[in-house]
Image (spheres, rainbow, N blue to C red):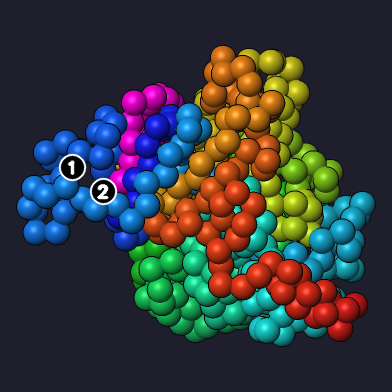
Amino acid sequence: MLRFYNGKVLTMNDEMTIHKDYEVWVEGSQIVYVGVATDGAGSQTAVSNACAGGNEKLPVFEREIDLKGNLLMPGFKNAHTHSPMTFLRSYADDLPLQEWLHQQVFPMEAKLTPEMIYAFTRLAILEYLTSGITASFDMYVEPEANAGANVDMGFRTVLCGTINDFKDSIPELERFYQTYNHYHPLVRYQLGFHAEYTTSEVLLRDVAALAHQYQAPVYAHVSETAQEVEQCRQRYGRSPIEFLSDIGMWQYGGGGFHCVHVSDADMDIIKEKGLYVVTNPASNAKLASGIAPITAMQKKGIPLAIGTDGPASNNCLDMFREMFLVTALAKLREEDAAACPAEAVLAMATCGGAKAMGLNDCDCIAEGKQADLIVIDLQQPNMQPEHNLIKNLVYSGSKQNVKMTMIAGKILYEDGQFFVGEEPEKIYETVAKMVDAIR
């Protein structure tokens, strides 16, 4: 059992309250006690719950972590990414989306092997850990390679279907759904397709039918660019969101990645269907796709999450930068400095992402939840003075403040050191050799 004490705790289940007298105990993969500091003695209830057999003996801690005034909080959830695309970082920049995708990305991806996808995913995981990200919603091909990389490194992932006219089939999508929802505690799977513009109507209707069969949510890239929306209107006389809703795609919920170019009618559908919107501000800005109407979505009560998108279009996997861009771009779009406050953004990056991904046991710090935790170093210049820690996290926080990242009760990153079963230099070397082989 591990004990965190002598610090600040942000549970994210009580409206952003910073608890200065709390401690947290972790046993196995779960949080077993959250409450007032005990100096190791513990409350009667906590001891009973934490000790085997419900006896009243004091727990024996394998390690007691003195936070020294730093902040313990839930890890960030990267609610949309393409982890293996680390191999394309800075390879095809300064291009619009369609040219970037069809002329640069797709031809290179065609050269990938499962072994490459495994290695490139491992590189992404290292970066996630340094950013305090404890789970990824990963949309990519070859799920076995992706799942294996995550399990081998102890990282949590939700794999997302990426079926389209060029890759995978309905039988494969169903097999993936069945396989990776019973694969490993760190791995889950959600139905998904790449996008309306890469997937025929026949195939889309088949995906919707599969979602009905399993009563499952569906996720996809949706309304990322103005061109995408216009071409969908030319094909079907409706926006992507209207069309997909009309064919029954979201009978059981799901979500849309990006959702930059959405109308009021689109947002009404999103709200009605209970869909999550995962915004990706850095990617959308870098590809000049636009600024999502986050404030309008908030006013409609649409649940929101944040993703980095892939490292080929971002190009980094940094939740701090994403949080700042979410709020800064919303303020710019609305010409209102009060738009999209820091508290709302932090919720999107943590519990909002967990809920969007279906990780309801990873959304906050509470007894019985998964111990997916991070420690934020407050003893850094950018975190001083502590007028408001929430605003510090969103407006001035950075990866330099991530002191520790824990997933399922295991510390994978601490004080600049990785504990993932292999030295990072070896992973870098393997990635470099594979990139040279396909360039």
Residue 209 to residue 61: above or below? below
What percent of the width, then of the height, locates residue 84? 69, 69
What percent of the width, then of the height, locates residue 334? 70, 21
Res. 219 mark:
none
Q: Which residue is mark 1?
A: 46
State which region is magenta. Answer: 10-25
On the rendered image, what quadrant is the N terminus found in? bottom left
Residue sitting at 79 percent across and 53 percent down? 315
On the rendered image, what quadrant is the C terminus found in? bottom right
Instruction: Answer yes or no: is residue 272 visible.
Output: no
What percent of the width, then of the height, locates residue 38? 25, 33
Q: Secondary structure at mark 2?
A: strand
Mark 2 or mark 1: name the one nearer the start of the chain. Answer: 2
Residue sitting at 33 percent across and 36 percent down? 23
What percent of the width, then of the height, locates residue 164? 65, 72
Residue 125 to residue 390: above or below? below
Q: Secondary structure at mark 1?
A: helix
Residue sitting at 48 percent across and 33 percent down? 68
Q: Which residue is mark 2?
A: 32
Exactly how many numbered labels are in the figure? Answer: 2
Amino acid carrying mark 1 in the image: Ala
Q: Quadrant of residue 346?
A: top right
Amino acid carrying mark 2 in the image: Val
Residue sitting at 45 percent across and 43 percent down? 74
Closer to the camera, 126 or 76? 126
Whether residue 132 is in magenta: the answer is: no
Residue 105 to residue 345: above or below? below
Closer to the camera, 266 or 24? 24
Q: Are marks 2 and 1 in contact (CB under 8 Å)?
A: yes
